[in-house]
Image (spheres, coloured by chain):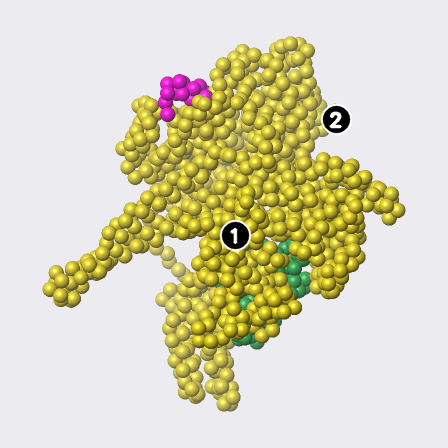
Amino acid sequence: MAHEVMIVDDAVMMRTVVGNLVRTLPEFKIVATAENGKKALEQLGNWPNLKLILLDIEMPEMDGLEFLRHAKLRTRAKIVILSSVAVAGSPHAAKARQLGADAIVTKPSGAVSFDLAEKRGSEIVQVMRRLAGA
Amino acid sequence: MSDELNEIWDLYVDDGSQSLDAVEAVLMGTRDAPADAAAIATLFRAMHTFKGNSRVLGLSVIESRAHLAEDLVGLVRDEGVVLDGELVELLLETTDALRGMMEAAHATRRDADEATTADLVARMRHKFERCRRGEGVAATSEAQAPPELVDAVVFEPMDQSSLIDDPVYREIFTGMVGDVLAALRQALNGPDEARAGSAAEAERLRFAADQLGLAEWVRTLEGFLALAQPGTAAIGALCEALSALFERDFAPAPAATAPEPAEAVVFEPMAAGTLADDPVYREIFAGMAHDMLREMRQALERLAAEPQAARETLTAEAERLRFAAEQMGLARWVRPLTEFLALEQPEAVQADALLDHLAALFEWDCAAAAAPTPAASPLSGTADGLDAALGALANLGARLTAGAAPDPGEVTAVTAAIAAAAEPLGLPGLSDAAARLATAGGDAEAFRRAEFRFYEELAAVEEAAPERLGGTVRPRALLRAWCADRVFESLLDLGNALEAIRRQGSVNGHCERVDERLRHVYYACRHYDMETAAHLTMALVDLFARVRSGELPADALLMHTVKSFVAAMELVFDAANAGQVPDMAAIEDLFHEASGVAFAASGVVSATAIETRLGLPRSFHKVLTPESVHTAVAALEAGHHFYIVRADLNRDETVAGQFLTWINAGGATVVSNVTVFQGDTTLFDFLLASPLDAAGLTEALASLDPGGAVVRVEMTLTDRKAAPPSAHPHPATEEADAHTAVPHEAPSGAMLEAIGEIVTGQAMLHHTLATLLEEDLVHSVESAVRAAGNDWGAARQGVRRYLEGVQEKIEKLGQIETQVNGLLDRLQEEAIGARKRPAALLLRPLSPLVEALAHQSGRRAALTTGGDDVALDVSTLEGLKEPLRALLGFCVGQSIEPPPQRSAAGKEAVGQLRVTVVERDDQVVVTVEDDGIGIDLARVAERSRQLGWDDESNLINRVLHEQWGVTANDPAGAGAVDFAQVAATLRRHGGELHLADLPGGGVRFVLTLPLAMVVLEGMVVRAGEVMYVVPIDAIQRIVHAGSDELLRVTAGGGHQMLRLGRDELLPVRLLGAAAEPQAGESGETEHKRLFVVAGKQSRRVAIAVDELVGQQSVLIRPLQGYLSGIRDVSGCALLGNGGVGMVLDVGGVVNR
């Protein structure tokens, strides 16, 4: 059975780009998307078997870091920070780690004319597979 | 272009427009009312989203502009910078520009042209720097290296137990407990269905408690969850148990510590005399004492006029101060105050003496506490006045410089205010400088010089005793900014002075002027944080001081150096002023020249010569004074040996003292020393000359510090007599050579250090392993048991001790291995760093190449480049050279039309070519674009049909297929290219080639290569007798498949296919002479075969292998000569077992 994934990002474009990437992977299934931490939190209860959350940091209403605090007490899903501000080694990354994030990946870049999966996407895929044990 | 990409481009504009609208709304709103924190957060987020989206599409120019805007908003959000009118307008302008660039990018699918927003970028950078400086944030912090950033990281599971200490988690959990208890209580009183939900509530809480490490909560809830059908009694019991746990773990502190409502609270008296040690009390006392002393001083001044009232004030203040001092336990204050208060009728002289005494005590006891408050010290009581006077002075100075003729009364008032503010500081130099201002009057030149001197004096006070100036006056920053504002004028004047010296044939009468202008330039360099340029300027100041004292002649070499300095610095400041990074290469050259001037005149070899001759590490470059060089030359002549000794002098005073005593006693001569910062530790590297050889020196240092923790030999230097030093090695020459061959550089100090430590680690590993190998575990255990008369109980203790000893050695092995791995990583980083070269070496030769190609093919073409400063590995540079030349050949010869054709198409006669190099994550991306006709897709479609390739989609990528051959729009023209060959060349270096046709015509080639190609993470596999390394990134999965999963496809020339899952078939690829797996045979003897599924998405193959050896990092070496022709292989690598593996070219295998 495919692993359930939630994507949380305020940018529609980013949700689409990452969604398109995840949809190429048969072992994962996107069950929910949300535009901020608050909406994601509201949906968490609907997905008891959620395996992974791909989470942005900078979002309105409730940002990724605050969501992490709440999510940690509410779900077993592994949380991957997908953000350009929480570059591993940065203070944001340290904070995310402290709050219980399982991994950090830099947002994809340079997908202007070719398959995203061949760019930064491959890193996201690797991390997703590793965390999901796929 | 695919629908998916079109959708993303459309979303880019939708999302981007929303973000920019949000930015504008906030910015426009500030015209009515200041933006609050929420509005600033919205502003930041919107700009951040826009930046991120641009990044996804690879629009690096647009991204960089949005990034700058985000940084500016970040200053407002995080650093307290005010969102003032100027910043609002600048951000609005940026938003407009971003919107335009976004729409253009959507239409053309191209990134924006850097040049169109260069001015905006310069202004944004300038504003950023000003904002940052205004906030008092240091412009640079050279000692602090930025944290190392990586692209992806997966964390180890964290220690959950720490979460319970986090108040936020506590709050969230207590909220959940409240909710769960409420739900359970409702279930208690509700119908049966309500009770059924209690298990879900309990489970929710159990999970949260488990996450927080609350074991007792978990146990309690698990007990409840174990019940098949919990009834009301069980739910009630659970409620009680949870309430009790909540009371224990989360309720407020028990009643014993919670104060009962009381009418009065009586505190225990504090121990006398301890308050003086408390910084808070010291600060309070300092403030009180400051005010009281001021009151007393004023009362003293009134004593003659109003003796009665003044004496009363003096006595009252003295009494209050004595009491405060007693409370503080400051006996030395109490005594003089008590004596003063004992006087029946204190006279002025006694009051004056008391105040002098107290002022001294104040300096002693309170100055530090009072320092943060500008007006806290009586001596700095004029800080506010000085601040205001400086403002007036700066204003006046600026107007005088601009040629204004201010009112003489104003000049007198301002200079008098400055003198009045400077006087109480009691610094003669400052008072003199203030007096010179007054005498300069309205003469602009004299005033300018006096103003500069005054700022310099004031800056010196800040340097030596900042507390005297209070917190708000920052003369150093003021001085630097003042000089930066006038630097072009100073350089012009310096040039004029040099011309006057040349005409006059002597420096007489000009030295002071040259010296002063050089100092202006020096402070301006400091303003822009240009370290090397500042060093150079100080070197010239020093040289002119020597000329002035007759120590040096003002010869042609010196004059030439200073003249070149003026020309070079104009360019440098031009760039700095425009917010660009100045090119410091000329400054570096001049530095060597300047050093040569001093040394040539003193008749000794130059510092550079010594650096070269001893092979000094970079940290010792540019620090050798003439004296150091003299010492080094004497030591060289005496045949001494040279060492760098690292000393942690703060670690152990005794050893540090012994070390310095040993040096003073003649153990070694200190040639020079530099400070090294390692985290919070300050270390010193000494360049020592000693008659002792390496062994002798090591022994001598070991006698001082046997453990080597305080002093140790960092490096043994060799006198390279054979290579006579070149006075001025020319960096430009080095650069020019760099792209034709890998330079053979001396390993850096850090590299040698790492190698040394690895060798030590290896020796320790060897030793520990040897002792372990000598152990015969079975024999030893059996002997011990036998010795105990085969009584296991009796032998147990001894055996246990023995095994623990062995265990300890194994653990030690593990530790050493970890240490060595860390060192290897460091060494690898050093090695990779040493191989970096600027992309300019690749890009610069392309312009003449394009010119020549255009000339040959009757075209006109202009090339622009971007990314000259990107640092690339030398092998990456090499790997890009040939593909780039081939692609540019295609652009010029095939894509860009001849001028008449271009004119007919409404294009400029000159075709535009652009090559940009961008570092993105761990890759270098080179984009080649033109505005010609690109690749003729109609021709591609026709040839596809000829080849029997009927699928019409993705036409442009057909040209990358191995069987395609050469591509040419005009077969008779120049520049036809076999793109598959170009792609194969890139793949050999671990890279890729992508093509895109641009909507408005033209072609874009995107070449990607790994930034550092030296190390590869690979899976080592065996196929037949050959070992191969498959790059980990290319592996999709590994499959163990039987013969029934293999099919032979007749239509595919009998090729084998591997069935993967229900409906996926992958072509099977064999490596070298590996035996083909047998399809369709079944039987008892059948064995499964291993396949590595590699490639990318839809282009995947199953590579048949015989064995998976394991994953490891390998160092790739290029294939030379005959070997370079081996198919499917991009290099070779040394494997962990000492053998050689072939690095698989997965792209080549897939496209075969």
**Rendered residue at 60%/73% (across/down):** B1063
| Quadrant of the image occupied by residue B330 | top left
Give the colour of chain B. Answer: yellow
The location of residue B967, given as percent across then percent down, is 73, 51
B387 vs B803, left or right, is right
B105 vs B720, left or right, is right
Q: Which residue is mark 2?
A: B404
* First in sequence: mark 1 vs mark 2: 2
- Local crowd at mark 1 within 10 Å, few (<14), some, or many (≥20)? many
The location of residue B483, given as percent across then percent down, is 63, 29
Pair 1/2: label in front: 1
| Quadrant of the image occupied by residue B811 | bottom left
| Quadrant of the image occupied by residue B491 | top right
Q: Which residues, given as a range, are shown in magenta?
A: B627-641
**Rendered residue at 62%/58% (across/down):** B1151
Viewer-proximal residue, A134 or B801? A134
Quarter of the image where the N terminus of chain B is located: bottom right
**Rendered residue at 56%/61% (across/down):** B1069
Give the colour of chain A. Answer: green
**Rendered residue at 53%/56% (across/down):** B1072
> Considering the numbered disc 1 on the image, is that residue within a helix, a strand or a loop?
strand
